[in-house]
Image (spheres, rainbow, N blue to C red):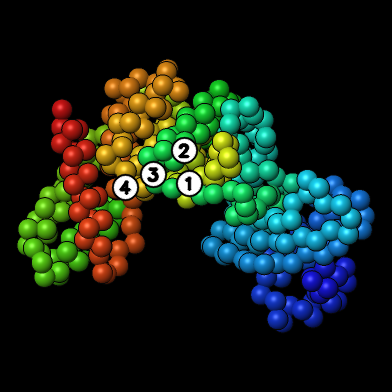
Amino acid sequence: EGVLAAASVGILSAAAQVCGTLDVARDLQDRPLSREWLEGALQLPSGHLKAFTVTSCQRSGQCCDLRLALRYAGAQDGLPTTLSFKRSWEKSMEPRIFEKFGDRLLQGAGVRLPRVFCNMSRETEADGSSATSILLMEDLSAAPFRRCTNSLDDLKLATTALAQFHAATMGEKDFLAELSKEGFVAENLTQAALDSWQEIVKLVAETPEEAARWSIEIADLVSGLASCAKATATQPGSEALCLIHGDFRSDHVIIEGKEVILMAFSHAKVATPALDLASLVTSSQSFASLNQLLDLYCQLLPAQSMAELRQSVRLACLQLALKPMEVKPPLDSRKLRLWVDFLWTLLNEMDA
């Protein structure tokens, strides 16, 4: 704590040999994090923050997420004892969402976004195509929060929060148009996805049990998916566009008492609501609950046509099936069986 909380850049430089997070724990001017910077971000008087430590670091290709533990010299009533410090090296949606909506997006609806203490970004390319951003926000891994599970009750809470999030963003027409111009829109179906399904066909053919039947069945499924993709690629959707989460699943929903917190918006984009609903259903494998969740969603957004929404969600589930997948042996045959049966059901329903 003494080393990481020190104001001396020299001490921090020496500590770099034993601390693997100092490349991330920097402000936008590329200076090591200091107590003074954190006090400014938290709007604290000078000297009120005694020390801070980096307790963990999660790295990905686009960003790093540090968990910080804080200790105060004085009273800490209402002050966070842990924080998430997220640094992104690519143009990301998260800072834009928090800047645009912040705490006002779902105020009074029982749904909120994470509390943000600092949201800063700077362009790193002259054409604005790339940017470095910093988000200092509440640590949602801390008590009394709990992760949403795949139980039906929790999935209904998640669906309710999702409907309120979609409704709040649908009215922001100018913001949605701006994001669309910048390319933050849902991607089209790709040949790479069909190729990854072909890899599944090969792996299934190599498994001893029922290999021949499985291979033929999944090969037929791939053919059906390809036909559906071709038939629907040029059909304009009639649903209203909104800002979708882009990777909506129970892992990205936090429950705090009666309040729901939505998190992890790095894949957010402009699209139809059906993509988020399809993501929730397929990621939780709650195929049997699809109709109940759609009924709940339409009750909260009555402007949505139930018939159109059902059709759109079916298409969205098929679109998720047509995303490139990382295919590695051994395959989980039980999960693959559920997935294949569900996709066949959707394809048969789409025939009409």
Measured in 3D between alpha carbons, the distance from the residue under mark 3 to the one under mark 1, in whole angstroms, is 8 Å
Mark toward the start of the polypeptide (4 vs 1): 1
Mark toward the start of the polypeptide (1 vs 2): 1
Figure quadrant of residue 112: top right
Figure quadrant of residue 276: top left
> What amino acid is at disc 3?
Ser
Vertical side of 211 occupied by 219: above or below: above
Q: Residue at x 70, y 57 (%)?
A: 82
Mark 4 against mark 1, which lies toward the viewer? 1
Pointers 1 and 2 in contact (C-beta within 8 Å): yes
Residue 33 visible to an observer of this rendering: no
Question: Which residue is the site of mark 4?
Answer: 285
Question: Which residue is the site of mark 1?
Answer: 148
Mark toward the start of the polypeptide (3 vs 4): 3
Front residue of 221/230: it is 221
- What number of labels is visible? 4
Circle 3: element type: loop
Mark 3 against mark 4, which lies toward the viewer? 3
Mark toward the start of the polypeptide (4 vs 2): 2
Q: Position of residue 186 (x, y in %)?
A: 43, 40
Circle 4: element type: loop
> What amino acid is at disc 2?
Ala
Question: Which residue is the site of mark 2?
Answer: 158
Measured in 3D between alpha carbons, the distance from the residue under mark 4 to the one under mark 2, in whole angstroms, is 15 Å
Pointers 3 and 4 in contact (C-beta within 8 Å): no
Figure quadrant of residue 93: top right
Front residue of 152/179: it is 152
Circle 2: element type: helix
Front residue of 279/48: it is 48
Residue 82 visible to an observer of this rendering: yes
Front residue of 23/90: it is 23
Circle 1: element type: loop
